[in-house]
Image (spheres, rainbow, N blue to C red):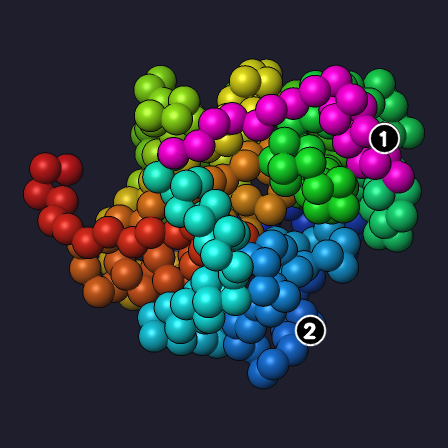
Amino acid sequence: DMSNNGSVNPNIQSETDTDMSNNGSVNPNIQSETDTDMSNNGSVNDDDGGDGDDDREDGNPNILSEKMPENAANVDEIESLIAQQMMKLSVEDREKVYCDVHGVKEGEKETEEMIQTGLDSLQREIEKLQDREAYDLAYTKDPKYLERRSFRLAFLRSDSFDARKAAIRLVRHFQVKLDLFGEEKLVMDIVQDDLDRDTMDALYTGTDQILDATDSAGRYIISIVFGAPWTTRAYLQRSFYNNTTTLRNPQKHNQGCIIVIYSLANPSQQGDMSKHYTFTKLAECLADRIEALHLCHDSPKGQALLTVGKAAASPSIKIRIRTHFGKTSWW
């Protein structure tokens, strides 16, 4: 059921089965499209300070409520932005990006001292964040769930032991979990029984899965086919559930991951673009260290959809994106 003339609401709630709790009020954790503060006249403008790292360190946990910028599908503007970010990198940092993309590097050399220092720093950074309502709610329910060493270490590894960024990622993780699955699942691992029917249908199509094989550097591979008519909520729940399964394997987080997205969509409505923008934002809430993102398309419209994904990606991921064009007759 595609309401609003076929457009898809970029908010998390399902278009067809929106949960209007609190006597019909909308979840306050999800901002509407009309009241989101968009600086720079709604255009994408990532100023990463020259090192390619995330600059979105305001700690806003409601990252999925961001409205898609007006120029998000403009191929020339987004490619120019990425090129500018690459030019700001030092030779050493640029070489690191190339090595990450092509898998010509060793895994992180972790020591017990490094791990303990990182965990201590992570706790201090969490305490500094002002807006952490969902995280605090989870902590009051079951502090042991949040204090698990392996759980916290997964978030540290996702941001290469940058405690500030890992703290923001962790707080966002619980905000998204609360919005997607409700308070009763906040301190429980998400299992298939927690997914709604639409999400289960999306899950069993196999269009978003973690492959058994790894790349030459031992990094796990996530394959996503974008273009199926699932709701935004189904896309988000499915990816959140898949990430929950990787949290059980510490080795995966140590090596990082590669994501390959196939855009087979033929977006005829702006809602298709908004849905992809919101879906890409989810990466900043999950415990995945994305070292390369390969975007594959077979048409100009598919390219426009993937460009929206580039616009939504954090600066550190933008510079690790590679785009591939080709036919999909084999599909």
**Relative to 4, is 144 above or below?**
above
Q: Position of residue 263 (x, y in %)?
A: 29, 50
Vertical comparison of 85 with 245: above or below: below
122 within the magenta span: yes
- Label 1, label 2: how far apart the Cα atoms are: 34 Å
**Residue 117 in view (yes/no):** yes
- Residue 174: percent from the left, percent from the top? 72, 38
User: Which percent across, then down, holds residue 40?
Assistant: 60, 81
Is 233 positioned to the left or the right of 61 in the image?
left
Question: Which residue appears farthest toward the left when viewing the image?
Answer: 329
Give me the disc on residue 120: 1
Dominant SS in magenta: helix
The amino acid type, in three-letter code, at marker 1 is: Asp
Q: Report the amino acid beneath label 2.
A: Asp
Residue sticking out furthest to the front: 91
Residue span colored magenta: 104-124
The C terminus, quarter of image: top left
Q: Earlier in the sequence, mark 1 or mark 2?
A: 2
* Residue placed under numbered mark 2 in the picture: 37
The 10 Å Cα crowd at callout 1, few under 14, some 14 to 19, many 20 or more, is few
Find numbered disc 1 in the image and state the secondary structure of the residue it sits on: helix
Q: Residue at x 44, y 49 (%)?
A: 95
Which of the two discs, 1 and 2, sits closer to the camera?
Answer: 1
Q: Tell how many labels.
A: 2
Q: Residue at x 39, y 26 (%)?
A: 217
Q: Secondary structure at mark 2?
A: loop
Left/right of residue 62 with respect to residue 103 in the rendered view = right
